Amino acid sequence: MRALALLMVASGTLVLIGYMTPLAAMVGGLLSVATWMPWFPAPGPSVFLTRLAAILTAAIAIAIVCLGPGAFSLDARLFGRREIIIPKRSSSSKS
């Protein structure tokens, strides 16, 4: 159970600083759902024991995975910000 808690803290820290954001958010979301499931016995009261809290945490993790790190994250500093370039439409006329 300590390993599970350590993984949750590590994934939360990685999301907070913005390093390996999609992977860390995916691990955090899976761990929050795994603590709600009966696979791991809960030693005491936990925030994620309710189904709604686990589902909302997983939904937030999915959103972070899809959105990725922000402009002021460590990923953006190391790998550069991504810019979407939309190509201009060709002016060929078909008649």
Image (cartoon, rainbow, N blue to C red):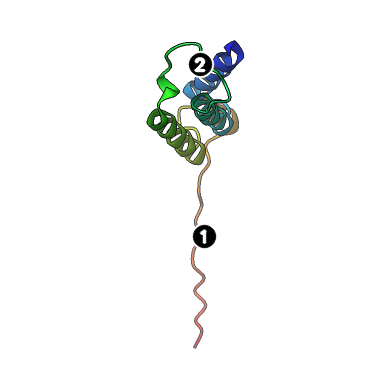
The amino acid beneath tag 1 is Pro
Name the image quarter holding residue 78: top right
User: Which of 47/81 is in front?
Assistant: 47
Label placed on residue 87? 1
The x and y percentages for residue 59 are: 44, 37
Secondary structure beneath label 1: loop
Task: Relative to 87, say whether 16 is above or below.
Answer: above
Residues packed near mark 2 inside 10 Å, few (<14), some (14 to 19) or many (20 plus): some
The amino acid beneath tag 2 is Ala
Task: Relative to 84, say whether 77 is above or below.
Answer: above
Name the image quarter holding residue 79: top right
Which residue was labeled with disc 2? 42
Going from N to C along the chain, the mark reached first, 1 or 2, is 2
The x and y percentages for residue 63 are: 45, 38
Label placed on residue 39? none
User: Which of 87/24 is in front?
Assistant: 24
Residue located at (49% from left, 81% from top): 93
The x and y percentages for residue 20 are: 58, 28
Residue located at (40% from left, 26% from top): 50
Mark in front: 1 vs 2:
2
